[in-house]
Amino acid sequence: MREKHSTGKKISDEVENRVKLFLSQLEARPSHYSRDHNTDRMYLESNQTRKLLHQRFLNENPDLVPTENEKGVKYWFFCRIFNFKFNISIGYPRSDLCSECEHLNARLIVAGRENNEQGETEILFEQDNHWNTANYFYTVIRDSKTFGPDFAVLCLDYQKNFTLPITGINFQYFSSHINVHNFGIHDVVSKNATMFMYPENFALKGSNEVASCLPWYIQNQIPNVANKLILFMDNSAGQNKNRIVFALLQYLALTRFESVTVIFPVPGHSYMPIDQDFSIIEKKIKKEDRVLSPSQWTQLIVNARNHQPFNLAYVQHPFTPNLEPDGRPIIKIRNFRESLAPLLNTRLFLNGINKIIFRNDFSCLTSRVLSRECEVPLAIFRPEVNPFAPSKYN
């Protein structure tokens, strides 16, 4: 009996090792959205299922088909190894793919079909450099969490639009709705976040709105001991990466901070801490089948996170059913674009810039490589004007 049990144990280990070898050779990718929390978690393509993987394993190992074969690998046995022996899961379809990643993948497929080994090696080298550059952005965010109190580290972005009302009635699904904008600012160190919520008829989603909400947040949420500001924001030219916002940041470097550093991610690799806040809100939104008044949206955001609830501020007018104030702050939008246009250079050639630093000596330096120091000067203002002279500013 002992000898038979020993032989069966040996066969079982051999079969398990073959399943493990199969699973270890699957192509998987790290999480794009929760890499800070799941550093070792890997995800398979969204079109895969455990059933398909089990069938694929049996096709490649016909001697382990579970008919009358005692060594056969049944589905439950395959799933047990998949679930408990490997830190992998089935991924979801991604809607924010990186164009450079897709381009390199297409070139890699073509090189493989042409049996071009040298071309494959060169493309893989380019791919590694691209991924290292993209991942460096997340390394910078992670390291910034340990900065001292003299640093203020913020992450800001717009969430995708909400709609009002949501009724669930068929014909209203095809009717026009009011878009509700949500601009969020997340403190990377304290993890506090403030949401600036307003409908599309109150204000737009542009540089004026960003340049109006950011100073209010700094004045009311950033302690005076912080003398350096670091901002993480995406490459959206209409909202963040433009001369209007840069003029504001230069002003903040002259009047409030010793320096203001702006860091942009590689397009397609731009999941930031503020996006984690947005995902919490969107999970709550999916559970709502009726939203008939503005107060329902505001309460949903305030109650979306139990620990450290989100702060809420209005833009232009109170976003309440009767448009009456309810005690929350109201930020007025200023037309910076109209007032600053005569003072700014019209063409700045910002494509490809990944880091900018504004200093209190009225200098602005840029870098196209995130891991390098900013050395290339950028002239935001026209040389013949000084926009912060008393005669101009007052």
Image (cartoon, rainbow, N blue to C red):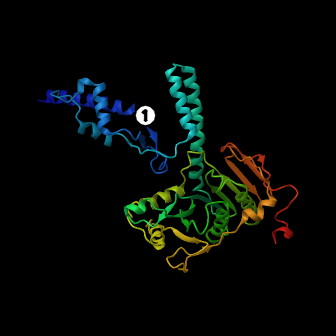
Q: Nearer the viewer, residue 199 or 375?
A: 199
Left or right of 375, for residue 98: left
Q: Nearer the viewer, residue 191 or 43?
A: 43
Q: Position of residue 179 (x, y in %)?
A: 52, 63
Badge 1 amino acid: Glu
Residue lying at the far left of the rendered structure: 1
Left or right of 41, for residue 110: right
Q: Nearer the viewer, residue 114 or 205?
A: 205
Q: Position of residue 254 (x, y in %)?
A: 77, 63
Q: Which residue is rendered at x = 57% and y = 23% of the image?
A: 119
Q: Position of residue 60 (x, y in %)?
A: 31, 25
Tell me the quadrant of the picture where the N terminus can be found.
top left
Q: Is residue 257 visible?
A: no
Q: Position of residue 205 (x, y in %)?
A: 61, 61
Left or right of 216, for residue 127: left
Work out whether 43 lies above or below 361.
Answer: above
Left or right of 27, for residue 6: left
Q: Which residue is rendered at x = 69% and y = 69% of the image?
A: 334
Report the residue marked by disc 1: 27
